[in-house]
Amino acid sequence: MTSPKDDLLPPSYLGGPQITGENCHREAIHIPGSIQPHGALLVVRAENEGPPHEVLQASENLGEFLEIGPAAALGQPLEALFGPQVSRGIVQALPLGTTDRLQYRTTLQTPTPLALTAHRVEERLVLEIEAIPAESSEDNNHLRNAVFALESAQTLAGLLETAAEAARNLSGFDRVMLYRFAEDNSGEVVAESCRTDLAPFLGHRFPESDIPAQARALYVRHALRLTADVGAAPSPLTPRLDPLTQAPTPLGGAVLRATSPMHLHYLRNMGVASSLSVSIVVDGRLWGLISCHHHTPRVTSPSVRAALEEVGRLLNLQIQLKEQADVAAFRQQLAAGHQQVLDTAARTLSPLQALSDPALGLSELLRAGGVALRLEGEWRTLGATPPAEGLEKLLAWLQAGEDEFLLVTDHLGSRLAEAGAWTDVASGLLAVSIGRGWQEAVLWFRGEQPQVALWGGATPDHAKTELGPRQSFATYIEDIRGHAEPWHTGEIAEAQALARGLSATLGERLSTLRKLNDDLTRSNEEWRKFAFVISHDLQEPVRLIGQFMDLFRLRQGDNLDEQTAQLTHYVNRETARIGSLTADLYTYTELLSYPELNLQAISLSDLLRQTLADLAPLAESKQLKFSGPTKDLILNVDGPKLQLALGHVIRNALTFGRVPVQLSVSAEAEAGQVTLKVQDNGHGVPKEYQERLFELFQRLGKAGTAEGNGVGLTLARKVAELHGGTLTMQSTLGQGTTLTFVLPSPPASTGSAT
């Protein structure tokens, strides 16, 4: 991940371009090469090599604060300027390795007392010198009162209002705002204290470009930024570059660091002559700012700045505590529903069905308009959700993303282009993965909620173009579409906790089920291969046995005695049965292994005609009397497979029918399906056996005496199921049997009769 400094432009004193509204996000604000003129600055060598602690750079205005000018100060040891006691204190307080966030402060006992603030930047010491203005006796009281008021605030909103008022009392600025950053880095004024004659900014939003990434990064590292006078000319460093490294000296931690020309322009347009900001950092993230504005130049003393920094640090802690308390209180309201969901998941054998029960209230738990659950490869939805194909796109997007467990947005359309079609039901999404990888998940949705935003002068789209830096800060009203009500921090925490609970409750079960399913799939595949090989390899020896017996009978002819003739007849009959069985098993395993259909338009009359031709010898022996459908139908089916199924059904009727066998086939096409009925006049099948006959190797009669091989009806039903249809049996003892195919594709009817 790149840092904000990776793509910064060189400053103008190094030949860089002029900073404008279009490139200010790349301005190197930490190396301005100059300081604000109300103080002076020295850069001192801190490493042991060379002259100890010599001055390498000095601001041009140094002579206004010390009895030595910048040219004379360069090359001088630190001790020569400030004496051994101050020099030793600085060096001991800021040893090698000290972060630039740590400061050392002392007072210089010059004719006019001066405040000295020092910090370390790698192998350099940066010293800032300022005049000490007369302090009010009320300053300490203001700080004590501010601390007490902040600690006493009951709510987050109350805390922010108190902080704004306290910071204004401490600083004396005309306006103090509490500014909070949103996820998109735009900001909103959430609390304000100002002079009564000033137009309020409370509730106004400001685009991300107002405080670009590199500025936000500095706010995280350094708590305070000050601009004392927007009209004052900066004082450059002498020399501009570090003489040993020939590189700009980083001044990010210096309070006197010169303010960006673009920010000065911004403040002038706002009517502000002086500003001070204190960062609010919560959990290492820039939460917001205490932003102070004054309409005349104002130098804020080091002691007041230190007090404001203390308010900022206390605010950091109190915001964290208040947010945690707010989340805890919010989640307490959801505790009963949360436990009910986990109890339901723990008790059920069908978690998807149980959790999608409307009575459980999973959608209402997080104030969602709809919820979608995905468990064990299936979806269930409640309320308003995207369509099925939309859910699949969402799932694929989640699985391809970097977020392994949680995704939260109140503007899904900005994250996923396809979501623009679902704004009415899915402008907001809170999704949690049950376990890693989004194989199982819960997705809560919220529909669009039109909003109005009050912008301080311009929307983000215009803030950097014709209005940047903005010429006016009058309220700009924007209608916002495609957004849902933002998810409460407590709802996000609740969803995460619920996901962890469901993962613990269902995770092991789902993992076990997936493993069992994988094992079953692998076992079925191995069985199919085994059956395929066995049935295929048996056909050749069975064929050879049949051929051998035929050859034996031809050669022996009339020489066979009666017993030998019976034995050879028995061998021929059983060989034929084995051949029929292996052929049917081969076909069955082929259907299981290669279930794809080759659909084509085919005439039902042609199918029946070919099927009866293949069964002609058996039909003749059974004295078949056949009647077909009165009208031909054109079916959209896999012809060879359906002919195979019809062949087994008709063979079954011929085999078990009473001679003479009467067989009729009727066909109807209606309501998006075709129904084929094959009816015989056989002995019938007892009701308790009717469904069992569709199972593999199930036959009527005792083993070894029943006709057929117990595969035909199983094959026929499998063909019907591959077409998305059914095959069922209706039978009455003594009156015959009817086998009914129902296929889902409607045929086109022709007018020809059979």
Image: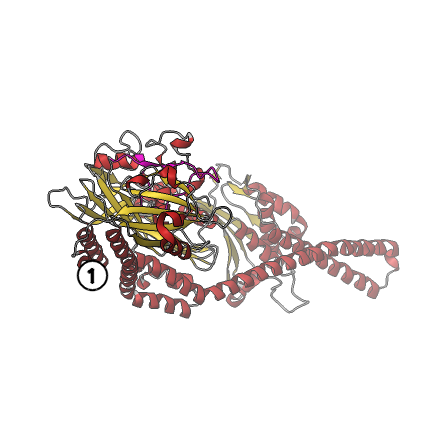
- Residue plotted at (66% across, 68% down): 703
Q: In the image shown, does 599 or 356 lie closer to the viewer?
A: 356
Residue 631 position, x and y percent, is 49, 41
Residue 698 seen in the figure: yes
- Judging by the rendered image, the residue that carries numbered circle 1 is 144
In the picture, residue 174 is in which quadrant? top left
In the picture, residue 585 is in which quadrant? bottom right
Q: Is residue 575 left or right of residue 734?
A: right
Residue 254 on the magenta span: yes
Residue 128 on the magenta span: no
Q: In the image shown, does 307 or 632 lie closer to the viewer?
A: 307
Residue 519 position, x and y percent, is 59, 62
Mark 1 lies on a secondary structure that is: helix
Vertical arrangement, residue 144 with respect to residue 64, above or below: below
Q: How is the image coloured?
A: secondary structure
Q: In the image shown, does 216 or 437 lie closer to the viewer?
A: 216
Residue 699 position, x and y percent, is 61, 64
Main SS type for the magenta part?
Answer: loop
- Residue plotted at (48% across, 48% down): 400
**Residues rendered magenta in the picture:** 232-261
Q: In the image shown, does 587 or 105 lie closer to the viewer?
A: 105
Residue 413 seen in the figure: no
Q: Amino acid at mark 1?
A: Arg
Tag 1: Cα neighbours inside 10 Å, few (<14), some, or many (≥20)? few
Q: Is residue 712 left or right of residue 310?
A: right
Vertical arrangement, residue 691 with respect to residue 48, above or below: below
Total numbered circles: 1
Residue 688 position, x and y percent, is 52, 68
